[in-house]
């Protein structure tokens, strides 16, 4: 009975549509949800600018997903890339699987997490005595088909950041212990946040994040007052506040779902693709990750706006987010604010100010 009540009880989350300003961060999160293959988003900004609030709000906004009941990997019974081995075997043996609807998983990665806690562990004793692969799932298993949030990612051990980025890129997590190997799906949107004052990420790791959003403290006094008033009234009576925003939340939820469905049909002209690569080349971006992410993000932006063809406007909205963190060559340099990307973009696409 108590368990039932606890399941129904959940902490109220500030509505995504009620967040004032921070458009760059909100756009980056929405595009990553529409196409998780963009590769996650790194959010850098001042303290107290609503980074964590916004990330929890996007997870709460998203529609529920259908999973196989009691499955540790949140397996999807109709997609091979999103199901664990046990579910795959059950489907091959024509067994009937019970499913349930759950909210999109939102996993917080604590700074002190160990590699075993993140990846999962294999019970060697059980494997040796009973001859079965006893796997204790970690946070990556829990995050499959959801969001994995790392606050202060710039303070996390580099090898852990590497593991997270590898799993986010490949969609799979492999655990190797004492000659035993387990592989399970780990397809999630990786969101990292941090304060630049506390140190930067290594350039190699930074390049692996699909997008980089920068947020600054709001300077306009009227906007600041609005933010304070909204937060205060939410804290006083969260449920009334959430109900007031329900229609806006549902509208945005529908928009994201229809964008996800439209995404596979979105086309981009060859000329635009060439110009994107020209921008990357002129900015001296290492590798091709910048080109790939910009193409993906432009298509997701077009789908978000209900179109099946990418326009120059789509590219202009996302190109800074996708490229600004790939310009660094010297570890002592700070990240470009985006002016350099914007200038080169306007030159190549022949846009006048």
Image (tube, helix red, strand yellow):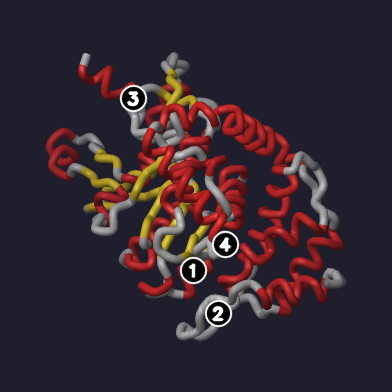
Mark 3 or 2, nearer chain start: 3
Alpha carbon of mark 1 to alpha carbon of mark 3: how far? 36 Å
Q: Is residue 172 visible?
A: no
Identify the residue at image location x=36%, y=28%. Answer: 71
Mark pair 2, 4: CA separation: 31 Å
Q: Can residue 133 be seen by looking at this rendering?
A: yes
Quarter of the figure that contains the C terminus: bottom right
Q: Is residue 180 left or right of residue 258?
A: left
Report the mark closest to the observer, 3 or 2: 2
What residue would you read off at disc 4? 220
Marked residue nearer the N-terminal end (3 or 4): 3
| Residue at 34% from the left image edge and 24% from the top image edge | 70
Q: Using the numbered discs, state the Cα–Cα distance from disc 2 to disc 1 in whole angstroms.
A: 10 Å
Looking at the image, do the residues carrying marks 2 and 1 touch, with CB atoms under 8 Å apart?
A: yes
Residue identifier under label 3:
70
Disc 4 packing (10 Å; few <14; some 14–19; many ≥20): few
Q: Which residue is mark 2?
A: 328
Q: Which residue is mark 1?
A: 206
Looking at the image, is mark 2 or mark 4 earlier in the sequence?
A: 4
């Amino acid at each position: 009975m108590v368990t039932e009540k606890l399941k129904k009880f959940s902490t109220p989350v500030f509505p995504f549509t009620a967040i004032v300003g921070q458009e760059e961060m909100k756009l980056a999160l929405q595009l990553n949800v529409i196409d998780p293959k963009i590769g996650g988003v790194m959010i850098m900004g001042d303290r107290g600018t609503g980074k964590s609030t916004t990330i929890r709000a996007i997870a709460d906004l998203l529609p529920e997903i259908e999973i196989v009941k009691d499955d540790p990997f949140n397996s999807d019974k109709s997609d091979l890339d999103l199901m664990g081995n046990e579910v795959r075997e059950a489907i091959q043996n024509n067994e009937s699987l019970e499913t349930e609807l759950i909210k999109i998983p939102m996993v917080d990665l604590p700074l002190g997490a160990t590699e075993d806690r993140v990846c999962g562990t294999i019970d060697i004793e059980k494997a040796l005595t009973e001859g079965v692969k006893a796997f204790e799932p970690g946070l990556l298993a829990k995050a499959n088909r959801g969001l994995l949030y790392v606050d202060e990612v710039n303070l996390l051990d580099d090898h852990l950041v590497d593991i997270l980025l590898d799993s986010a890129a490949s969609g799979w997590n492999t655990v190797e212990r004492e000659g035993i190997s387990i592989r399970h799906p780990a397809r999630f949107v990786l969101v990292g946040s941090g304060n630049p004052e506390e140190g930067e990420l290594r350039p190699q790791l930074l390049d692996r994040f699909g997008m980089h959003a920068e947020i600054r403290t709001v300077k306009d006094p009227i906007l600041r007052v609005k933010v304070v008033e909204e937060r205060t009234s939410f804290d006083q009576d969260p449920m009334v506040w959430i109900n007031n925003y329900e229609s806006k939340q549902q509208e945005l939820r529908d928009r994201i779902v229809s964008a996800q469905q439209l995404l596979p049909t979105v086309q981009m002209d060859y000329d635009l693709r060439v110009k994107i690569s020209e921008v990357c080349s002129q900015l001296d971006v290492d590798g091709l990750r910048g080109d790939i992410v910009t193409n993906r993000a432009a298509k997701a932006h077009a789908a978000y706006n209900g179109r099946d063809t990418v326009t120059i406007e789509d590219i202009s909205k996302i190109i800074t987010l996708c490229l600004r963190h790939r310009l660094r060559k010297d570890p002592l340099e700070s990240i470009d604010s985006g002016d350099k990307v914007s200038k080169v973009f306007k030159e190549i696409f022949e846009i006048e100010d």
